[in-house]
Image (spheres, helix red, strand yellow):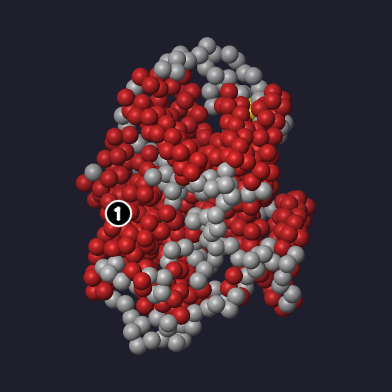
Amino acid sequence: MVDHLLSGFVLLLSWQALLAALVGLSIGIVIGAIPGLGPTIAIAVMLPITFAMPFVPAMMLVLGIYQGGIYGGSISAILYNIPGTAAASATVFDGFPLAQKGKARRALKAALYASVVGNGLSCLVLLLVAAPLASLALRFGPPETAMLMLFALIVVGAVSGRSLFKGLIAMMAGLLFSTVGLDPVLGSSRFSFDLRILDSGIALIPVLVGLFAVSEILVQVGERDPTASGAVADTRQNAADDVFGWLELWRMRMTVFLSAVIGLVIGALPGIGSTAPAFLSYELAKHRSKTPQEFGHGAIEGVVAPETANNAVTGGALIPALALAIPGDATTAVIIGALMLQGLTPGPFLFQNNGPEVYAILIGVILQTIPTIIVGLILLPVAVKLLSVPRTVIFPAVLVMCVVGAYATNYNVFDVGVMVAAGFVGFGFRRCGYPLPPLLIGFILGAPFEAAVRQSLLMSQGDLSIFVSRPISLVFIALTLAMIAVSLRVARRMPVGG
Amino acid sequence: MEKASAVFFIAFGLLVAFVVIPLEVDGGPIIPGQPGPAFLPKLLALGIALAAALHLLFTLLARPAGPGPAPDEAAASPPLPGGAARRWLAALAMALYAPAILLAGFFAASAAACAAMMLIFGERRVLTIVPVAVGVPGATWLFASQALNITLP
């Protein structure tokens, strides 16, 4: 591990990697600040660009967008009462009231510092935990891998969105779409509809871009411009105490620590994402506060807690993504796509086969906390300016860029059609309240899941007991059944909706 | 919407399982102990139908939904008058985009699509539409072809 750490550090010390990190952070912060866009869309659109780049700069670009985007969502949350990303939904409760009182800079700096600390802490844990977890995963054979993926798929389906059944339907739909192409064992054609191009399956990038970016354009075109409501904080009017410093953040260290733990632990669970940790940490901070009545009216801890948690998710979500090839959320699913584009296979062998490269990016995401502060402070005014670019310009421009991204996958216009179709599917799902992350994660995990199941059955000559006769596999089956039981119980108690 | 979507997925699952799969999934050689190529797709299709049926049952039996948005979605903006029509037009523009690229090439198709989308979004200033509709595809083409060596049609 030490050798790989040192080699990784050397790989990181190139001007291309540093430049890519800064560019990624900048893009992420700006895109994250625009309601309707977000790091997932930004990474998906930039993916074809990373194909032409060396590995470390490519991943620094992608991870920079990821880290910057989560923080960027807080900017419009504080200034416009509109979360730029779903993860910033809890930040509006106290961020916007602070801005209305003329303390926008206080709120923005608190969000920035909290984001950096949350991100840094979780990435440090990632550095320590990922490789040992990958080593543990080497003991996994096809049955263990299959059952782990089944557990991840069920968790994603069960906890995404507000309805158990909708999440499971979305997950199974994603798995079904992944079966298009040739059967992995027998080579038979499935769902090609006499189109040879479909024998190689549906490409990931057009689906990614379509599900998130194109569907968002369709959502936005039918809704009022959220920034035209007039409810904008006046950043010119600053109160005398419109300041925030590291000392004040240190005084809230217990809130920061607990929020980081919540984000890290929940972020490591597949499918949950960064929104739930943000709300949980907000509620915990309010519960622990000596002045809970201030929450919702401009309590600075009401900004610090959710921003620490939602940024701590970045490291947590990368743990299963790198070590086990299980995406923690939709954005890490896209990041897995970026790794695959570079010719690397996430999972237990990633650290063995590409140790220096992987450690380079792990060290990079930790060190990125420093430029995040600098870039964040510099870009705050720019991001605020960009919010004034009308969406009548932004979204058509995004569509054109999406088309380039989709086309560049295989240099085939067919993939542009796939992107548009995925956009329609994504829009339909969203309108009917079906969550998109399980659909995407099902699509990504479908092929390796089926391969693991088929390999297991080949090993056992069709005997299903192979899945229950191996201890680790049995543990995952038990966890899966427990998750289903808990989810069914919760579903029976909850009102139907969403 | 709940019931309609549930019925849709029941129909979708059953259609895929009993109509599409027999037509579109080749049987392949039989290996003892190995499920065939249709096994997983059929299982998933039937799983979708079953989950949708259970969802429909729970919807019919359960109490109405409470207020408030889903916690995992940002607050939605109020709908725009004529929003549904705009969505249909946007969908049409997107659907025609790929064939337009084949017929007219990337730049012309993108300029037309960009202008169309701006109009659909409500932009009416010609001095904004023309530069953006020309500039964005032009800049994108330049960046893609010169910086990334991506040859666009």
Query: Could you say which quadrant of the image residue B78 lies in?
Result: bottom right
- Identify the residue at image location x=75%, y=50%: B99
For disc 1, the marked residue is: A261
- Identify the residue at image location x=54%, y=59%: B68
Query: Could you say which quadrant of the image residue A296 lies in?
Result: bottom left
Q: Residues within 10 Å of mark 1 (few under 14, many from 20)?
A: many
Residue B115 lies left or right of residue B31; in this view the side is right
Name of the residue lying farthest toward the left: A2
Q: Does the rendering let one see residue A57?
A: no
Q: Nearer the viewer, residue B125 or A48?
A: B125
- Which chain letter goes with mark 1? A
Up-down: is A441 above or below A102? above
x and y percentages locating residue A263 in the rendered image: 35, 54
x and y percentages locating residue A187 in the rendered image: 58, 24
Up-down: is A24 above or below A197? below
Residue A366 lies left or right of residue A221; in this view the side is left
Q: Nearer the viewer, residue A88 or A493?
A: A493
Q: Does the rendering let one see residue A298?
A: yes
How many marks the image carries: the answer is 1
Amino acid identity at mark 1: Val
Name of the residue lying farthest toward the top: B32
x and y percentages locating residue A210 in the rendered image: 61, 51
- Identify the residue at image location x=76%, y=60%: B85
x and y percentages locating residue A37 in the rendered image: 54, 62
Query: Could you say which quadrant of the image residue A301 lies in?
Result: bottom left
- Identify the residue at image location x=38%, y=50%: A267
Name of the residue lying farthest toward the right: B103
Element type at mark 1: helix
Residue B147 lies left or right of residue B87; in this view the side is left
